[in-house]
Amino acid sequence: MIAFTPQLAARLVALGVAMVILQVAAVSQIELFGTNADLSPLVVAAVGLMVGSLPGAVFGFAVGLFLDLALVQTVGLSSLVYLAVGYGAGRWLELRDPQGALVPFAVGAAATAVATIGYALMQFLLGVDAPVSFLLVREILATILLNALIAGVVHAIVRRWLMPALPEDPRRRRRRAYTTGGLSPLSRS
Amino acid sequence: MHDKTVRRRRAVLGLLVASSLILLTAYFGESAGGGLHAVQRGVVEVVSPIQEGASRALKPVRDLVGWVGDTIDAKGEVKQLRAERDALRQGAVTGAAARRENDQLRRLLNLDRSRDLTQTGPVTSRVIGQDPNVWWSQVLINKGTSDGVAVNHPVVGPEGLVGVVSTATGTSAIVTLLTDHRTAVGARIAESGVGGTIMVEAGRPTDLVLRFTTRNDEVTPGQTVITSGTESRIDRVPSLYPPRIPIGRVTRVDDPGTDDQEVHVRPFANMRRLDFVQVLTRTRNAT
């Protein structure tokens, strides 16, 4: 498990606040394919995928709470949904350690699906009288598709921002050794 | 060691889930003046100036993306708009004569209660934030109680009715949109005077429904829906909205000629592309 250092915590707080402000002030007002992108599940999933299940869950909970407070929504609803997203992405990292180039896209789509469908289910459970209409399904699918498209970029930005605060990854160190002219373990032996 | 890590992880996860559920329960259990609501208003107060700055700084980006989308959309709309222009030109000629007659009759009957929006104390506000989820029910504006904005004040945009103020702090306010499933607006058909209540089902944000019309009310696609204002003669149940504010256009009628008939209306205002709105501050039942 990755150690939760003060530097990492500070970077996560800055990331969460900046993401919510950017989402609310700009991204929500940009319409693409009849919907708008939702950065929150992408950033929470990217964080979970980099730092693990527990910090991912805490980050998801905090981002959700901030969203609920800043947007005057039902407090606790987004926290619960994003807590699941952060924890799920983190658990996947711990159990499978995925490395493929398409991983951020798949995780982004899955995180968005969990967040949007989970949010809708919670709304139904809380008594919102809503039909499962074609428009709602189309809206959810369009958001998942759009988020999947931008998930790679979001993941790269989150990775670049958090990397200095994360402990050195042995795989990364090995790669750097090859590319900077270092000897491979085979040639050394 | 491994067991300890697993136990710790489960404990923290359980604690977070329990916290969320406690927050949810507490939020539902308390009144609008409760502790969590007060914290929300405080957070909005702190965050809104930052959001306003971010909204202004990121406007060029929004405009650029909007311009690309508009250019694509505009090509498809030209034909429809030309037909609409011709119809409107015809209507304007008829309307001008009708308005003159109407004014004369009003003066004759001493019923000149024309409620121009300038009399309702409009406060122009910038939209500085929008709800990001697919239920997109509210926007944040940069005017609050210090500008005369209060809860239940109606909000209009360039195209028509937008919604109503649901939360107001000193420098900002939350506007619950017309497309929110909690909103209901007294409305009538401009051409025929058929009355009803405009509502929306969650998850169908572009499809408003005019309910509570009767089987004898004839409604056809293309007709305009406007606010009805207060219809009670004794003003016991005043409407939040002034009369004659455009809401939208009728797109179709389900089960026409029955008591279950539902009139579907597409709102004039594009709730996703709101830059500026006006809060009408001189209405009767703001709190």
Image (cartoon, rainbow, N blue to C red):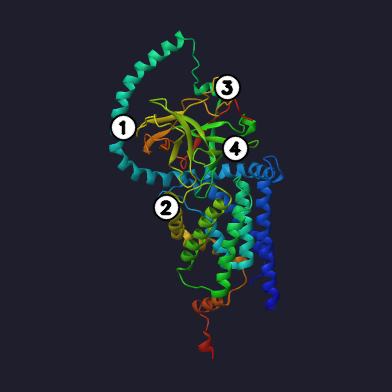
3D distance between C-alphas at marks 1 and 3: 38 Å
Mark 2 residue type:
Arg
Q: Which residue is mark 3?
A: B235
Q: Position of residue B35 (x, y in %)?
A: 71, 44
Q: Position of residue B187 (x, y in %)?
A: 47, 30
Instruction: Residue B190: name its quadrant.
Output: top left
Sequence-first disc among 4 and 3? 4
- Let me know if marks 2 and 1 both belong to one chain: no
Which one is closest to the eye, mark 2 or mark 3? 3
Q: Which residue is mark 4?
A: B166
Which one is closest to the eye, mark 1 or mark 3? 3
Given residues A155 and B251, the one toward you in this image is: B251
3D distance between C-alphas at marks 2 and 1: 29 Å
Few, some or many residues within 10 Å of mark 2 (<14, 14–19, 20+): some
Q: Which residue is mark 2?
A: A138
Which disc number belongs to residue B84?
1
Q: Chain of mark 2?
A: A
